[in-house]
Image (cartoon, helix red, strand yellow):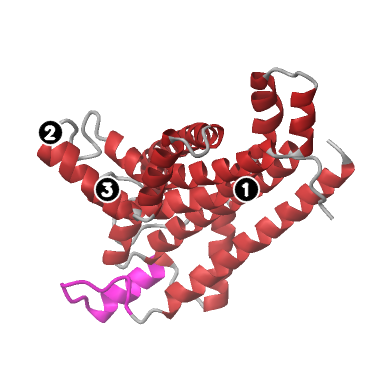
Amino acid sequence: MNSKLLVYMFKRFGMALLTIFLVIAITFLVMHAIPASPFSSEKAKSDAVIKALEIKYGFDKPLGVQFLNYLWGVVHFDFGLSTAWVGFTVSQLIINAFAYSASIGFSAAIIAILLGVLFGCLSALNRGKWVDKVIQVVTTALVSMPSFVVATLLLLLFSYRLGWLPSLGTQPGGMVLPVLSLSLYPMAYITRLQRSSMLDVLGADYIRTARAKGVKSNVVIYKHALKNALSPVITYAGPMMAYILTGSMVVENIFSVPGLGRLFTNSMLRTDYMMIMGVTIVLAVMIILMNFLSDVLYKVMDPRIDLA
């Protein structure tokens, strides 16, 4: 690892930390600017009860003191107490929900990358043939449909019409449809990226030179062309995870998966400020870190990239 790459990593890591701080600050200020109270409910509470709750949750202190206390807690992964789920901390609920979201998101990302690269290479190597045309039509259709539409169609077809898979994500085999719902769009997008990148690489001078020297076709494709054609896919890894994480908020509600997406939606309906801030920060940190890793891997995969 050269010095330029180390300097670049430190710079990107510093920018990531600054971005995380801004996300925490903006989320905190926006939540405290909302006129609705986290203690408002259908049952009216007396002023004395509301005052006691504000003292319990630290809302009686000045805004600056609240922000510093909250920032210190975030550093130690302590997002405070949930105002909707009494007796539970925000961190406990996030950890429990994260297991489901991580399982769905990781599986969807792996499927999207593997199948996207495979179909992209297959389409590029069969340019103009029927295989290429079929892949182009299917990926265009999938790219045009958002995840909640795909999720609804899969639910109607495989659960209600055919009865092959359960409709609830908590049932055995219930994670199949949510994973498919989140993986189809990025898989189609990666297929198109990989096809375009593969065609550019296959037309490069060094590929033609390798073939002229008699290098076997499989070696040219897998050792030389594929590695260089993966750069756009690596770059897309960060935005892909953002899509999967944000898309899971709708998909998890459709399939009743108790993940971060459903937790976030329920916390908004129940005006749980602490939970909304905690989930928002966790999702933002994950997206920022994925972008950081994709930038570093992009340079590692293609040393020709100038980091200046």
In-image side of 88 versus 220 (left or right) = left
Instruction: Tell me whether the residue at label 3 lies in contact with that at label 1, contact meaning CB atoms closer than 8 angstroms.
Output: no
Where residue 69 appears, x then y in whole percent?
55, 64
Q: Earlier in the sequence, mark 1 or mark 2?
A: 2
- Could you say which is closer to the camera, residue 245 or residue 93? 245
Q: Which residues are magenta?
A: 36-56
Q: Is residue 59 above or below residue 249?
A: below
Q: State yes or no: residue 38 in magenta.
A: yes
Image coordinates of residue 263 in percent, x first then y, are: 33, 53
Between the residue at mark 3 and the residue at mark 2, the CA separation in whole angstroms equals 15 Å
Find disc 3 in the rendering and name its residue: 151
Task: Judge from the rendering whether residue 262 lies leftward or rightward of residue 143; answer left or right.
Answer: left
Compared across the picture, whether 138 is left or right of 232 comes to left
Count residues near mark 2 (Cα–Cα under 10 Å), then give few for <14, some for 14-19, many for 20+.
few
Q: Helix or strand or loop: what does disc 2 sit on?
A: loop
What residue does disc 1 label? 235
